[in-house]
Amino acid sequence: MEDDIKAAPAGATNDEAAGAAPAVANAVANAAPAAQAATGQAQGGLASVNQIVELADQLSACADQLHERIMRDIRAYEGREVPEKVRAAARALLEDEVILRQRANGLYADAATYIVKSLGKSQQGVVALTTEAAEKIRKITRIGDVAGLVAGLLHLAGAAATGQAAPIIMALDKIRTHMAAIEATNPPAPATKST
């Protein structure tokens, strides 16, 4: 059954494509005038080529965490029959992983055209949110929570490709809201005894 899951479209071609796209984006970013980058930093998040590339890096990191999470969940069955429900969820998440990588690669390739002039959010805030999302993907215990968070990341990746502030802000809010809901439903960590 694990072979069925591994046969999903998350193979070496994605890894090869993920390696080529950042090189193209870096060439574009290096060709951008320094004044544009300096101005983009002052305006806020996603306002320069380098910031779009940074978001693409973060989305790729989320895809990496998602892939590791799916494989870890499948390996947990240790060769036993994987229930159909788990296989279906894994296949759906692997498809989402592919889409997330494709959107990140699109951001790398076309970073110069996706600059957002008036996002009103700091680049540090955008990066912190996507970094936290990658960590949650790794640690979340319920697969349904992973699927919802990945949907938010896909929304962000698609919104970033529009170059428009409103859909990006909506996507960031969706991710933030979903992570808050996950925190609210997770049991609190056990208290440690002081001696």
Image: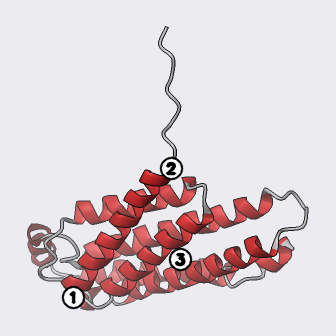
Decide which of tag 3 and tag 1 comes sooner along the chain. Answer: 3
Decide which of tag 2 and tag 3 comes sooner along the chain. Answer: 3
Is residue 65 in sight in this rendering? Answer: yes
Neighbor class of circle 1 (other Cα within 10 Å; few <14, some 14-19, many 20+) is some
Neighbor class of circle 3 (other Cα within 10 Å; few <14, some 14-19, many 20+) is few
Three-letter code for the amino acid on which mark 3 is drawn: Gly
Question: How far apart, in angstroms, are the residues tagged by discs 3 and 1?
Answer: 27 Å
Question: How far apart, in angstroms, are the residues tagged by discs 2 and 3?
Answer: 36 Å
The residue to which callout 1 is attached is 164
Question: Residue 195 at x, y = what percent?
Answer: 49, 8
The residue to which callout 2 is attached is 186
The residue located at (91%, 62%) in the rendering is 80
User: Residue 171 falls in which quadrant of the image?
Assistant: bottom left
Three-letter code for the amino acid on which mark 2 is drawn: Asn
Mark 1 lies on a secondary structure that is loop
Between disc 1 and disc 2, the foreground one is 2
Question: How far apart, in angstroms, are the residues tagged by discs 1 and 2?
Answer: 34 Å
Question: Residue 43 at x, y = what percent?
Answer: 9, 72
